[in-house]
Amino acid sequence: MDKVNIGLSPKSRTKVISVLSGVIADQYILYTKTRNYHWNVTGEDFAQYHKLFEEQYSAIDEDIDDVAERIRALGGKTPATLAEFVKAATLKEHPGKYPSAKAMIANLLADHETVIRSLRKAIEICDDVDDDGTEDFLTQLMEKHEKTAWMLRATIES
Ligand SMILES: [Fe+2]
């Protein structure tokens, strides 16, 4: 770990870096799944979903960069291989499956909700070690997922 003198002990930073490494792993899976659905969605609402998924994976892509750079700011090396992401992620992929547009939305909603619950725990860990910066950062990230989850939920409500 890099020498960083910002008032957080190496032990605290190690803990937060480990939390952020879990966050980026799930973000990467969710990014890939959303992009998969952007490519493979079919049906009469194709254009609408194709565009919605693009907006969502683009937003997640930016968040991934922020999480990675937050790990670096805390003195850690960011996990940056697909193998590490798949291993550390709690979200699951479903290779070879091409669900209906409605099922895609439901899958993404479930994943965003899983991420929100993980982030809520991650925020508490940051609070325990007095890392106000990461606590604030992850709170904002959680709010973005809550908003996306609402939009997905509203899309499948009849
Ligand atoms: Fe595209």
Image (cartoon, grey):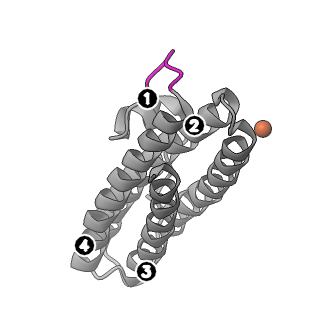
Seen in the image, is 15 located left or right of residue 77?
left
Residue under circle 2?
32
Residue under circle 1?
93
Which element is circle 4 on? helix
Using the image as rendered, state which of residue 16 and residue 139 is in the foreground: 139
In which of the image's four quarters is ligand 1 placed? top right
Task: Mark 1 and mark 4 in contact? Answer it, CB < 8 Å.
Answer: no
Percent position of residue 156, x then y: 47, 49
Other-residue count near label 3 (Cα within 10 Å), few / some / many at <14 / 14–19 / ≥20: some
Q: CA distance from mark 3 to mark 1?
A: 29 Å
Task: Mark 2 and mark 4 in contact? Answer it, CB < 8 Å.
Answer: no
Q: CA distance from mark 1 to mark 2?
A: 9 Å
Which element is circle 3 on? helix
Q: CA distance from mark 3 to mark 4?
A: 11 Å
Residue at 40% of width from left, 46% of height from top? 111
Task: Mark 1 and mark 2 in contact? Answer it, CB < 8 Å.
Answer: yes
Mark carried by residue 124: 4
Percent position of residue 29, x then y: 49, 39
Q: From the viewer's perspective, is the residue at label 3 or at label 1 nearer?
A: 1
Mark carried by residue 136: 3
Q: Please, what is the three-letter code of the amino acid marked with disc 3?
A: Asp
Which element is circle 1 on? loop
Give the main secondary structure, helix, strand or loop, of the magenta stretch: loop
Up-down relation of residue 139 to residue 117 (above or below): below
Extreme residue toward the left, this view: 128
Label whose residue precedes the other's in the sequence (2 or 4)? 2
Q: CA distance from mark 3 to mark 2?
A: 26 Å
Extreme residue toward the top, this view: 96
Q: CA distance from mark 1 to mark 4?
A: 27 Å
Specify start and end residues of the magenta stretch as a single range: 93-99
Other-residue count near label 1 (Cα within 10 Å), few / some / many at <14 / 14–19 / ≥20: few
